[in-house]
Amino acid sequence: MTQTAPITQDVLTIPRKLPEGPKNLVGLTRDQMREVLIAHGTPEKQAKMRVGQIWQWIYGWGVRDFNEMTNLSKAFRAELAESFVIEIPEVVSKQVSEDGTRKYLVRIAGGHEVEVVYIPEDSRGTLCISSQVGCTLTCSFCHTGTQKLVRNLTAGEIIGQVMMARDDLNEWPEPGAPKDETRLLSNIVLMGMGEPLYNFENVRDAMKIAMDPEGIQLSRRRITLSTSGVVPEIARTAQEIGCQLAISFHATTDDVRDRLVPINKKWNLEVLLEALRSYPKVSNSERITFEYVMLKGVNDSDADAHRLIRLIDGIPAKINLIPFNEWPGAPYERSSNNRIRAFADIIYKAGYASPIRTPRGEDIMAACGQLKSATERARKSRREIEAETGQGG
């Protein structure tokens, strides 16, 4: 295997200057919302109650207009409208795959764009959201990783993706209507653009909003955060978010993982696995999902399967086998179906669930590792992409 990828150094992310004018309430925690209301004149004794009322309107019912918040006085509604806004990312385009997958291109502050994917299934509907514009990680098999990091998303831009999808699915309940337990959007996966643990605080605050019992009300067991292995933040994720954890694992030796997932040069398999052994106990998660992309002749041998079983011994786990989703200039090929099935069979016989992920939304480039903003993709010719991935002649 000749393909290599540079290790990414620690990135100092400079917070962007917030826009002038009214403050956006979307993305504020309850404590932060209380503080800004008090700063704008709400009496301290009333502030907690006001937060509860506004929270219910924004996250319970999806209301964006203060005038519709009928349990607030007209005078207070006018004060709110003067000082605050309720804004979420703007949908630039929506594509719907033959299999029902929806891919949204959304625009955030500064004119940047990220992609969001909704995947409907019989028993659930999963929203794949982004945490950064671009990515720092340069994983050599991932198309998203060929887009340079621009900036972290704010908590409002992260939870705003969930709100945008609920808009499109027409899934906000009516105030006073009987509670409907069926959910079109029942699960969130932080598997879109970016490394969530390089944007920890914003991801944490957004997921706390998603889990709040008086708003969107998603159980922490229905939220999965996928990391490539930012070891220092894994323990914090268990303590401060407590959601399910997925690891972009993809290799069973440091040599191969160094090339596929360059962050491995900083936190190798031994260090990563040590952090993962503690996670289920602290977070009360049932098991960790190991994501494993199947690359022909690279990481798909029987020996790899047996090594994988030895590595994860003692960790409550399931192994998600992901057929490689090819993209223009990709340096790898998808393993054959027979090879993937043989690999899965070894894992299964060792006592681990080893589902083979059905690629979804391939016809609209919405599958795993394919996400990239359309504007960025349009700017690059096939030759440029090949040059970036070291495949150019």
Image (cartoon, rainbow, N blue to C red):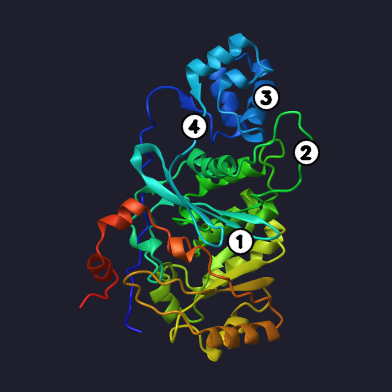
Residue hosting label 3: 53
Asked whether 11 or 223 is in front, the reply is 223
User: Label 4: how many residues lie within 10 Å, few (<14), some (14-19) or many (20+)?
Assistant: some
Query: On screen, 356 above or below 216?
Result: below
Query: On screen, 73 above or below 289?
Result: above
User: Which residue ends up furthest to the front in the rendered image?
Assistant: 98
Query: On screen, 256 above or below 284?
Result: below
Q: Which sits earlier in the primary sequence, circle 3 or circle 1?
A: 3
Q: Quadrant of residue 99?
A: bottom right
Report the side of 384 relative to 161 (left or right).
left
Q: Which sits earlier in the primary sequence, circle 3 or circle 4?
A: 3
> What is the C-alpha distance between the residues marked 2 and 1?
30 Å
**Amino acid type at mark 3:** Gln
Report the side of 109 relative to 227 (left or right).
left
Q: Which sits earlier in the primary sequence, circle 2 or circle 4?
A: 4
Helix, strand or loop for disc 1 = strand
Helix, strand or loop for disc 4 = loop
Residue hosting label 4: 87
> What is the C-alpha distance between the residues marked 1 and 4?
29 Å
User: Which residue ends up furthest to the left in the rendered image?
Assistant: 393
| One can see residue 41 in this view | no
Residue hosting label 2: 179
Report the side of 292 relative to 7 (left or right).
right
